Amino acid sequence: MASSPFSSAMEEKRYDVFLSFRGEDTRNGFATDLFQALRDKQILTFMDHRLKRGDEIAPTLWKTIDESTISVVIFSENYATSTWYLDELVHILDCKKRNGQIVMPIFYGIDPSIVRRQEGSYKGAFAELEERFKDRMEKVLQWRAALTQAANLWRLFAIQERMEKIENLLDIECSTDVRIIGIWGMGGIGKTTLASAVFQKFAYSHFEGRSYVRDVRQQYETEGPNKLRMKLLTQLFNDENALISMDTPLVGSPFIQDRLRRKKVLIVLDDVDSSVQLEALVEGYHQLAPGSRILVTSRNKRVLKKVADEIYKVEKLNTIESLKLFHLHAFGRNSYPTEYYETLSKRVASYADGNPLALKVLGSFLHSKSEEEWESALEKLRRVPNNDILKVLRISYVGLDDEGIKNIFLNIACFFDEPFTREYAESILDGGDSSAKIGISVLIDKSLLEISHKENYFRMHDLIRQMGWSVVSDEHREPGNRSRLFDANDVCHVLEKNTGTASIEGILLNMSKMKRDLKMSSAAFSKMCNLQFLKIYCDNIDSNKFKIYLPRGLEALVSNELRYFRWDFYPLESLPSDFTPENLVELILCRSLLKQLENHVVKSLPKLKKMDLSNSKLLTRIADLSQAPNLESINLEGCTSLFYVLSSLQNLHKLTHLNLKGCNNLIELAEISGRRGHLDIVQTLSKNICHLNFTLLNSFITGLVTNFSLCSSSLNISRNFPMNLTSLNLSETAIEVVPSSICCLAHLRTLDLICCKKLKSLSTSICKLKSLRLMNLGGCSNLEEFPEFLEPMEDLTAIVLDGTAIKKLPQSIENLIGLKYLYMGGCKEIEYLPKSLCGLSRLCLLNLGGCSKLQKLPPCPLGLKVLNVNHCEGLKLIEEVPPNLTHFDARRCTSLETMSSQTNKSYPMCISQRILDITQVLFEIGS
C-alpha cells in the first residue's frame, strides 16, 4: 500500500522539536501560539494537526519522535484521560533513555506535583484507567511511572544540575578516602540551599553519622568554639550526654578520633569565613572513617583552598531560571503574570542579576501589589537597595580586615562600572606598593568580584555594587563630607555650592542623569586635595540635554593624587595653570573645547598610560610628550584642527596604540620633520607600536603608498613601520595598491582595508604574513583580483570580501589551511568558485548571499556548518552540500535546478541553541 503524503513527509523530515499536547486542552490556545512562535524562530517543529484522538498511532509518528532532537511535552488538566498521549509520553521517555533525546516538560495550568503524584484531575483519570485496564495493570503502572519521571525532569532554579555537580565532586560511592568539598559564592547565591539539599538526599541513606552546623560564622562569634564543637560532636554521635564532662572537646583528641574512626559521617559546615573556625571544627579530619565527607560553604575562597579537595563555585541563575524563581514568590505556583507584569518581572530579574536571595526577597515584597506599586518599587530600587538584601551582602564587606582593601572595594564599586582587566585596575588603583594586586585577589576570593563573561575581565555584581554605594552613603549625611560622590544630584549640589572637602577621593557624574544645567563654582575642586578619581562623562549623547558651565573658569585642580581624569565635553579652552598631575594614569577629554595641551600639563606625566582627546575639534597642537615615557595609547581621532603632534612620538617606546583617524590637517606636518612633500608619519614612530589607525587620511596615505611603490630601500616598510605592528587600519583611505613590502610586518594580525574605493589589487607577498588572522576588504568596490596564496597560511581564520568586484578566487586558496570564515556577500561579479575550496577542512562558515552571477557551487568542505546562498539568482547547481550543516539558506535562488539528493533535508541549529530559543519563546508567550 502506497504511503500517504503525510507519512512521506514525516519520513523525509527531521524535526528540531516534537510538540506533544492534548489537543482539546491547548490546541487552539497555548499550543498553537507556541508552535507559531517556534516556527517564527526558524525552529522546525512538528505539531500533530491531522490525527484525532482514538485513531491508532501510526508507526510514522513513532519515527517522527525518534528523529526529533527535542520533545516538548505540555501537561494540562486532562492530559491523563487519554491513553494516546500517555503512550506518546512513554515512547518519548524511551527515546530519552535510548538516544539521549532532550525532553522539556511544560505545565499548563497545573502544578508539577499533581502530575508527579497523579493527584487532582489525574487521580480521577487513573481511577478510570485502572478500571478499563484491570487485566493489564502493568500498562497503568508504566503510565504512572512515565508521568512521575517526566515531572521530575522539571527542576526549579536549576538546583538539580548544580546538585549533580557537587555530587560528582563528593563521589559518595567511593569509600576509600575522606574528602572535603567547598561550596563558594557571593552572599545569597544559594550555597546553603545546595548544601541542605545534598545533606537531605544522602545523610541518612549513605552515612552512619551526620551533622549540619548552620551559621558557623555567627555561632562562633556569639557562642565560642567549645560550644560549637560540642554541637557538632553531639549530632555526629547522636548522644547528648557522652561529652558533657569534657571541657574542650577537641575534634583531634584521641578519644574523639577513636570514636570517629569507626563511623562513616557526613558533615556540613555552613557559612564559614575564617580558617580558625574551620580548624576548630574539623581538626584531624583525615582520621575520620573512610568514605566520610565534609561540605563547607563559604564566601571566602581562601578559607576553602587550605583544606578542600575540590571547590564548587555556585553560578548565578540565568534569565529563565531567574524568572521562574521570581514568579514563584511574586505570583505563586499556579498563577501566571499578565503581559505587563511579565515585562516588569524581567526588569526585576535584570536587577537581581541571577541572585536567588534577591529574587525571593523582591518576589515576596511585590506579591499581590498593583502595577503602580511595582513601578514605584522598581524606580526606588535604582536609588535605594532593599535593606534585607543589603544586610546579607554587607557581611562580606565587614569581613574585610584591611582598610586599604576596603578602599579598593569602594573605588571599584563607585567608579568601575564596566568589566575591567586586572592590569587596568591595578594601574589606576595602585599606590606604588602593590596593594591593588593583593586587594583584588582578596576581593575575588571573598566573592566581592567575579570573572566576567569576557575572558580575563572582572566585574562586580550590581547588588554588591549597590552595597558599596550604601556604605559610602552612610559615611555622612552631607555629600561633601563623604569619600566618594556618584549620585548625579549629590555631585551637582557639591560642585555648584562649593561644599566639597578634603574627604572626597572620587567623583563620578553621568551627565545623562543631570536634571538641569550645572553652573559650577570656579573653586569647586579647590578643597579636594585628596581627589584621586574624577569622571564626568555622558553614556548617552542623544539623551544629554543639559550642559556644564564654568562662567568664571576653573581656578584649580589642586590634588596631586589624581590618577584618573575624564571629562567629556570639557568646557574650557585650557586646563588650570596649577594642574600638574604627576600621578595621572589616564587623561580622557573627549569632545572637549581644548585648543592646546600645554607644556605645564605634559611636562611631568611619568605614570600616564592613556591619552584620549578624540573629537576635540578645536585642538590644534599637543606639546612635547617626551616626559610621558609610559604612554601606551594615544587617541586623536576626529581632531580635525590638529596639525602639530608628532615630533616627540619617536621617544615613546611603550606606545602601542595610535589612532589618527580623521586628523586631516596632519598633512601640514612636513615642516616638523624637515622633509619635503608628504610627511612620512610612520618613520617618526616607536618601533614597539602595534596598532595604527590612519582611517580617512586620504591625501596622506596616497602619498605614503606612492612612496612605497618606489624601489627605494629607504622607503621600505621594514624600515619605516614599527616592527611590532599587530593591527593596521587603512580603512576609507585613497590607497590603490598594497605593496609587496607589507610582507615585512611579520607580527601583523589584523589588516583592515574597509571601503578603500580605489584599491584594485593586493600583492601575492601577503601570504608571508604568517601571523595574520583577519583580513577585511569589505566594501572595496574596485577590487577585482584576489591574490594567489603561494604558501600555506595556518593562522588566517577570517577573510571578508563582502561588496568587492572580485570575479574569481584562485585555486591556491586551499593553502589557507586555517580559514574558518569566508564572507563574500554581495560579490556580484564572481561567477564560479574553485574546486579546491573543498580542501579548506576548517571552514565552518561560507557566506555567498547576493552573489547574483554565481552559477555553480562546487563541493564544500565536510565540516562546513553555515552556508548562505540567499539571493543567488543565477545559481543553477549545488553539487553537494556537506552533511554537518546547522544552517542552510537557499532562499530566492530562482534559477536553482539541481541539488544532490543527500542535501534534500532540513538543517537544524545546534541543540543548545535550540533549547535556549525554545525557553525564550516560552517566556515571550507567557508560559
Image (tube, helix red, strand yellow):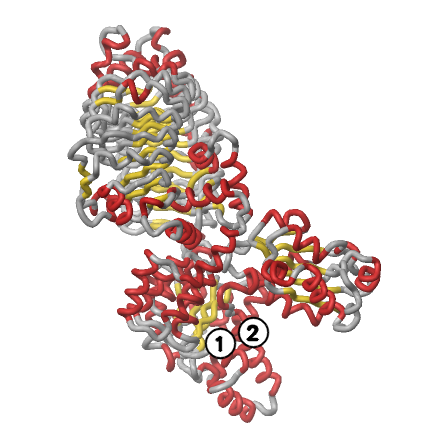
Q: Residue at x 36, y 45 (%)?
A: 482
Q: Is residue 573 left or right of residue 80?
A: left
- Amino acid type indicated by mark 2: Gln
The location of residue 177, given as percent across then percent down, is 76, 56
For label 2, the crowd category at 10 Å Cα-Cα, with few meaning under 14, some 14 to 19 and many 20 or more, is some
Residue at the bottom extreme? Answer: 131
Q: In this rendering, is residue 303 above or below 854?
A: below
Residue 701 or 523: which is nearer the viewer?
A: 523
Q: Residue at x 44, y 35 (%)?
A: 429
Q: In this rendering, is residue 778 above or below 447?
A: above
Q: How many marks?
A: 2
Residue 316 or 829: which is nearer the viewer?
A: 316
* Label of residue 149 in the image: 2
Q: In this rendering, is residue 340 above or below 527?
A: below
The residue that label 1 is drawn on is 112
Q: Is residue 318 left or right of residue 601?
A: right
The location of residue 234, given as percent across then percent down, is 73, 69
For label 1, the crowd category at 10 Å Cα-Cα, with few meaning under 14, some 14 to 19 and many 20 or more, is many
Which circle, 2 or 1, is nearer the viewer? 1
Q: Is residue 150 visible?
A: yes
Q: Is residue 256 left or right of residue 115?
A: right
Q: Residue at x 26, y 27 (%)?
A: 661
Label 2 – label 1 distance at C-alpha: 11 Å
Residue 369 or 481: which is nearer the viewer?
A: 481
The location of residue 651, given as percent across then percent down, is 38, 14
Q: Is residue 707 left or right of residue 188?
A: left
Q: Secondary structure at mark 2?
A: helix
Residue 412 or 478: which is nearer the viewer?
A: 478
